[in-house]
Structure formats: structure tokens, C-alpha cells
Amino acid sequence: MTGIDHQHTAEIDEAGRWLASLSPSESQAQAALRQMCTRFNLTIPQACEAVAQAVQIRREVR
């Protein structure tokens, strides 16, 4: 893996599903990242991975 390497966790999965469930207006990037870090006890890199997972979930739903 290139870039930041960190362990994929259940918290990242849960945060990704949560972000995918939000409407676009609810998931504004900066506020959502801070909220995910607090709500799911994630680091910024983990929250970013959750964002990527949310994007993938939304693509699969379409």
C-alpha cells in the first residue's frame, strides 16, 4: 500500500456507513471529519478512509 498505511477497523467501517447515510448538505467535509473523529474515536487518516468508503458505498447504491 502506498501513502499512509493504517489498520482498517470496525470503527472506520461504521463511520463510512454513517457518512454514506447523510444527505450532501449534512456531510460537508470539514464538519463531517471532525464529527467522525469525535463520534467514532478516529484519527484524521482513519476518518479520511471512512470518507473514501462512503464514496464507494454511494457508488454501489447507484
Image (tube, rainbow, N blue to C red):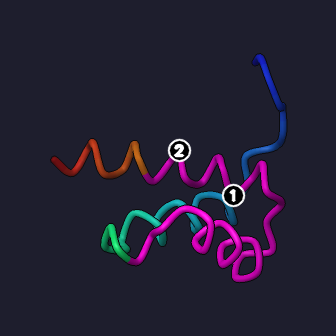
Mark pair 1, 2: CA separation: 9 Å
Q: Residue at x 36, y 71 (%)?
A: 21
Residue matched to label 1: 47
Q: Nearer the viewer, residue 34 or 47?
A: 34
The stretch of residues the image draws in magenta is 26-54
Residue farthest to the left, as pictured: 62
Q: What element does badge 1 sit on?
A: helix
Q: What element does badge 2 sit on?
A: helix
Q: Position of residue 50 (x, y in %)?
A: 59, 54
Quadrant of the image for the N terminus?
top right
Task: Name the mark on residue 30.
Answer: none
Q: Position of residue 27 (x, y in %)?
A: 45, 70
Q: Position of residue 7 (x, y in %)?
A: 81, 43
Residues at discs 1 and 2 in contact (Cβ within 8 Å): no
Q: Residues within 10 Å of mark 1 (few under 14, many from 20)?
A: many
Position of 8 relative to 17 (above/below): above
Position of 25 relative to 60 (above/below): below
46 within the magenta span = yes
Residue matched to label 2: 52
Q: Position of residue 20 (x, y in %)?
A: 39, 63
Q: Residue at x 60, y 74 (%)?
A: 31
User: Which amino acid type corresponds to the residue marked 1 in the rendered image?
Assistant: Ala
